[in-house]
Structure formats: C-alpha cells, structure tokens
Amino acid sequence: MKKTILILSILVFITLASQAKINGIYYVVNNLGHRITCHITFFDEKYYYIELDNSLSSDVIETDILSFGSFSLKGNGLSLVDAVNGHKIQLEVFNEKRIKVIRGLPFLNSKTLFYESKEDPFISEQYKSDYFNKVKTSLSLQNELDKYKSIDKNNILHKELYSFAKYELKIEKGGNYKFSYVYKAISEDTWKYLNLYERIMLPSDVIIIISEGTWKRQGNVLYLYDLSLQYTFHVFIEENGLNCKFLPGVFRDNLFLGL
C-alpha cells in the first residue's frame, strides 16, 4: 500500500512540475529555410503566441504573428486555442526542453520544438495589452458573415491565385486551396539582369504552407476547411479581390489581389 502511494505521489509531482515549467518558456523551430524561424512563446501561465521571424539583415527582423490565444496543460498534452478563430493546436510535452506539434498549422505538424530561452516579459506584455487587444476588438466573424451574406450580387472569383505582401492564397478549380507565406530571394525585375552564375548562387525562394485543404462557396463567402486543424476559415469575395483578414497572420483589411 505504501509503495502504491509513493508511486502515485511521484507521478503527481512529475505532472505538477511539467505544468509549472511550461509557463513562460520559449520554444523555437530553426529549419524553415533562408533565415526564417518560428517561435512559440508561452507567458503569464495561460497565454501564447506563434510568430514567424524573417531576418532580413543583421539588425532587421520582420515578424508575423500567426496565432495567439490561451493554452492549457493536462498531463503531457498541451492545447492552444486561437483567440481570433477558435481553432485548436495540439502539442505533446516530452520535458521542459522539448515539445512536439501533434496537430496544428501544416508547416509545424510533427515538428519538434526545443527550448531556447525565457520569454521577455516586456515584449509579451506589449503583445497582450496592445496588439492582441486591437486585433480581437477589430475582428468579428459574425459581423463579417452578416455583412457579406446581405449582399445580393455575387462577386466574380476572377483568379486562382491571390496575393498580398508575402502571403499567397491559391483557390484551385478542383476544390482545393493552399495559403502560404512566400519569401522571394529577389524580385522578378532584378532576376532578368542576373547572369547564370549569379542566379545559381542566389538562395532559393521559401514557401511555408500555413493552411491547406478544401473550399466551397456560398454567395460572397469562401469556406476554407483546413484538413490539418480540422477547422473552417472564412474568406470574403469583393469586387476587386479577396478579404482574407481571418486567415492566420493577416488579421487586417488589406485586399488580396488576383495574379
């Protein structure tokens, strides 16, 4: 009986220890191509954010937040719930130095993430109080659905490929879609003036698949079912392009234009 109690006590201690250590720990993925990394930061014992960092130079880093929200830990299962869309990301905790993505954004699936350093409380607080609150208050999915469903005229889906900044959304005629972060090593205009050697020496373009799956249309709303997250994202068809502000990393009203 005493032996059983001792074993149970050890298991409870290990579980509590892992829960205590997950809070405020910073994890990183380093193998996305070029100088692009992905970090997941946990802070305040319940919040997280996932960011892509692109080191454009030694002192310039471009950052995109792909998801943010709350997390909970049960045993070795770590569950993240996105604050904007509500989709869930599932991870497995091996120890305080290593976690693995079980189900999440496609480019992160089956990736192992390693501990890098403690999070910066100042940066996390700025995200929580400033950026996160602004995004959440400016986005209302139900309001957008009501707005676009009330439009009598069905806008034309002109192209298969739409883009804004470094994001591309491909809507295939066969019913599949792919939403990607695209880093181009050089512009097409500059490429034309390079010789063969210069072209060979250039780093490859980097394409990171953020979401992919199947799509269907109802009126001016595209329903994108992400096969990995098992969640439906919403994109809105306008006269001159697509409003993709509910897709991971976008979170703003900029119009995606057809290519």
Image (spheres, rainbow, N blue to C red):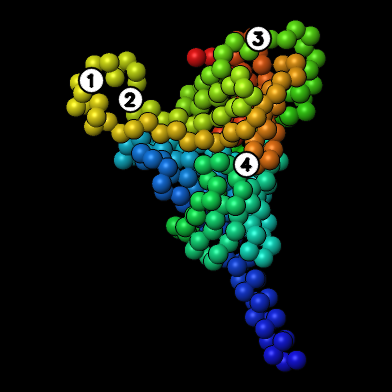
Residue 251 visible: no
**Residue occupying the point 57% across, 52% down:** 101
Image position, residue 122 (x, y; %): 52, 50
Nearest to N terminus: mark 1 or mark 2: 2
Q: Which residue is mark 4?
A: 228
Q: CA distance from mark 3 to mark 2?
A: 32 Å
Image position, residue 118 (x, y; %): 49, 58
- What residue occupies the far front of the structure in this picture? 174
Depth check, mark 4 against mark 1: the one in front is: 4
Image position, residue 79 (x, y; %): 66, 53
Q: CA distance from mark 3 to mark 4?
A: 28 Å
Q: Is residue 197 left or right of residue 183?
A: left
Other residues around mark 3 within 10 Å, as few (<14) / some (14–19) / many (≥20): few
> Do callouts 4 and 1 mark residues in contact (Cβ within 8 Å)?
no
Give the image quarter of residue 127: top right
Q: Which residue is mark 1?
A: 194
